[in-house]
Amino acid sequence: MTITAVLPAIARGLLEPLLPGEIEARWFSSPADANAMIADAEIAWVDMQPTSLVADAIRSAGPRLKWVSTIYAGLDAFPLDRLKAGKVAVTNGAGINAYAVAEYAVMGVLAGAKRFDEVIRAHDRHEWPKDAPGKIELFETRALVIGYGAIGKLIGERLEAFGVAVTGVTRSGRDGTLKSDAWQATLNDYDWVILAAPSTDATKTMIGADELATMKSSAWLINIARGDMIDDDALIAALKSGGIAGAFLDPTNPEPLPPEHPLWDAPNCMITMHLSGRSQTKMFRRGAELFAKNAQAYVAGEPMTNVVDLDAGY
């Protein structure tokens, strides 16, 4: 039995020695190649940037497509209706860059606590401040991590090492976390509100005017998830009024953020151009290893790792 798979040429050196003999690989190096090769393929790993190219490739697939693999954790750009209609299994990259993203989130907390943005600006001006612009100790502060999955748990573990009391939020309320309908009323309890949830219809603008008004005026909002989880107009208003102390935004909506967008000039706002997942060198190797592991399972008819619930979107 031969199983046709469309795979990224950039990963060929990593993947080829690990593939089961039953898989016949077609290596794409351009969107046009991916769109053509996927037409009669059974397996596809067609990650490209921007992710709209991935969606285009999947829409070009024929009825033989049974499994789509991706190194991305979020599937908000994928044509989920097309995948569900074709009964296509999807495995994502949850956990592949979890360490890097968790480290980045902690960096955001530290940058806000010590106002490292102000330190860098003083450096650029060749000034020597007489006092520290940020004086918050993480010790004995409290953090709410909304989305306590692979990345959220790592964020929590790292913050706890600094003496931060961490509360997680999950859809089910497992392991002592708050349920997804119970955290809003508790926002005034936390010094750090960290968004690490998957992007779904339910998470869009989950932080709006009401949520920001409930937060402490000394609290920081840290987003390493998706930009559309925040109502930007409400955030800008809260930053200008001092309703919250600041925001550290890795993703934005849209991306790239246009030069004229008012978020760039919002006070006490740090934007890092959705770099958290890229702040590592191991993602592609881990992705190749995960694909090879799942390929072995697929050929053997065994359960694969990181299978996505297409109805939930993650």
Image (spheres, grey):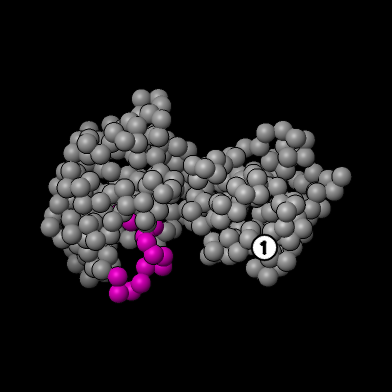
Image coordinates for residue 1, horizontal then vertical, percent: 87, 45
Image coordinates for residue 84, horizontal then vertical, percent: 60, 47
| Residue labelled with disc 1 | 60
> In the current view of this chain or complex, which residue is farthest to the top?
175
* Residue 299 seen in render: yes
Alpha-carbon neighbours of circle 1 within 10 Å: few (<14), some, or many (≥20)?
Answer: some
> In the current view of this chain or complex, which residue is farthest to the bottom?
260
Q: Is residue 36 left or right of residue 223?
A: right
Residue at the (28%, 36%) spot, across then down: 183
Camera-side residue: 151 or 228?
228
Residue at the (41%, 27%) spot, across then down: 174
Q: Is residue 39 above or below residue 194?
A: below
Q: Is residue 148 above or below residue 110?
A: above
Magenta: predominant secondary structure element? loop
Q: Is residue 288 above or below residue 296?
A: below
Q: Is residue 113 left or right of residue 80?
A: left
Q: Quadrant of residue 233?
A: bottom left
Q: Is residue 82 left or right of residue 261?
A: right
Residue type at numbered disc 1 = Ser
Camera-side residue: 67 or 105?
67
Q: State the extent of the magenta-drawn residues as a range.
A: 248-261
Q: Is residue 255 magenta?
A: yes
Q: Is residue 11 magenta?
A: no
> In the current view of this chain or complex, which residue is farthest to the right?
1
* Residue 103 seen in render: no
Image coordinates for residue 188, horizontal then vertical, percent: 18, 39
Residue at the (28%, 56%) spot, across then down: 231
Residue at the (80%, 44%) spot, across then down: 20
